[in-house]
Image: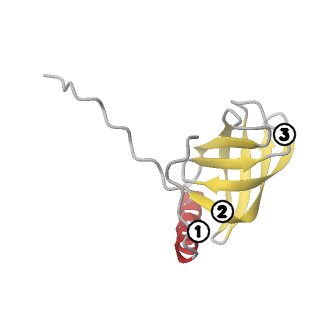
Amino acid sequence: MPSLLPSQRPARAPRAQLAEPTQAVLRLKDGRRLTADLKVISLTGGLLSLPQPVDAGCTGRLMFLTEAGMVAGSAEMLTPLSGTLQPFRFINLNPDDQDRLRSAIRVCGAQNSSDHGQIEHSRPW
């Protein structure tokens, strides 16, 4: 007999709100190259501050430098939150980049907790 209980939503990936500016480069499929500031990051995506938003659904290559090394992956831009803030989701991130990103999030979380900060777990985006 099928269960009548509502399905549980999977736990969200830990998010790290970056205390220091982290510059990112977004190369879109149409050839445009945009520089952005990375504000929040997780293993599944993050939040960029862009000079102007990009159309939701656009995909491209996102690259940024962490304390653990360079992270580069394919990303899809999501609906902008404002004129400058736009979330994205990773659509392809190879295992080495995942490891560097995981390490960077862990380091950021440790720095945040030593500064009485916290990893962002419940952002609406």
Instruction: Report helix, strand or loop for mark 1.
Output: helix
Mark 1 burial class by Cα count in 10 Å: few <14, some 14-19, many 20+: many
Name the outermost residue toward the bottom: 114
Depth check: 43 or 118 in front? Answer: 118
Depth check: 73 or 67 in front? Answer: 67
Q: Residue at x 54, y 72 (%)?
A: 116
- Please provide percent x and percent y for residue 28: 79, 39
Q: Which residue is mark 1?
A: 108
Instruction: Report helix, strand or loop for mark 2.
Output: strand
- N-terminal-most mark, 1 or 3: 3
User: Which image quadrant for residue 64?
Assistant: bottom right
Label 2, label 3: how many angstroms apart (C-alpha)?
A: 20 Å
The three-letter code of the residue at mark 3 reads Gln
Q: Which residue is mark 3?
A: 52
- Please provide percent x and percent y for residue 35: 84, 51
- N-terminal-most mark, 2 or 3: 2
Disc 1 to disc 2: CB gap under 8 Å: yes
- Please provide percent x and percent y for residue 103: 55, 68
User: Which image quadrant for residue 68?
Assistant: bottom right
Q: Which residue is mark 2?
A: 18
Depth check: 84 or 98 in front? Answer: 84
Mark 3 burial class by Cα count in 10 Å: few <14, some 14-19, many 20+: some
User: Which image quadrant for residue 27?
Assistant: top right
- N-terminal-most mark, 1 or 2: 2
The three-letter code of the residue at mark 1 reads Cys
The three-letter code of the residue at mark 2 reads Leu
Name the outermost residue toward the left: 1
